[in-house]
Amino acid sequence: MRRDQRITKGEGFAAARREGKSWPDSLLVLMARPNNLALSRFGFSVGKRVGSAVVRNRVKRRLREAARLTRVRNGWDLVFVARKN
């Protein structure tokens, strides 16, 4: 996933939480908001409750790969928050 397709700053995560719509599940929360750009951006948040650093990094890698393989319409900021199972 290219760098311009990722949300890396806290402001992007905060805007998605504040202005976006969310869909919770037992393992994941998806927050989405329109970004008025020509591309969609993705953000991934995995807290310490999920597990050790090795586990958190593995979860983020898998989420990034799933996002890379999924076609998403342009113009959205999508934030995925992993939950403890």
Image: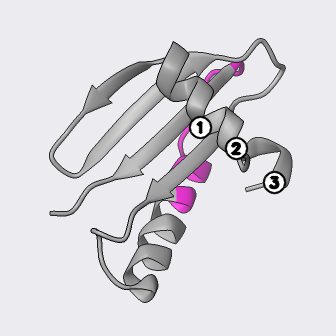
Amino acid type at mark 1: Phe
SS class of the residue under badge 2?
loop
Name the residue: 20% across, 39% down: 25
Name the residue: 66% across, 43% down: 10
Q: Earlier in the sequence, mark 2 or mark 1?
A: 2
Say which residue label 3 marks: 2
Tag shown at residue 13: 1
SS class of the residue under badge 1?
helix
Disc 3 from disc 1: Cα separation: 18 Å
Amino acid type at mark 3: Arg
Question: Mark 2 near mark 1, Cβ–Cβ under 8 Å?
Answer: yes
SS class of the residue under badge 3?
loop
Left or right: residue 51 compared with residue 25: right
Q: Does the magenta stretch include residue 67?
A: yes
Disc 2 from disc 1: Cα separation: 7 Å
> Across the whole image, how many numbered discs are drawn on residues?
3
Q: Residues within 10 Å of mark 3 (few under 14, many from 20)?
A: few
Q: Residues within 10 Å of mark 1 (few under 14, many from 20)?
A: many
Give how far across and how far down residue 57 sits, in percent. 50, 77
Residue 14 seen in render = yes
Name the residue: 42% across, 74% down: 56
* Colour style of the rendered protein structure: one colour
Disc 3 from disc 2: Cα separation: 11 Å
From which residue to which does the magenta span run?
64-75
Question: The N terminus appears in which quarter of the rendering?
Answer: bottom right
Q: In this view, does 53 lie above or below 6?
A: below
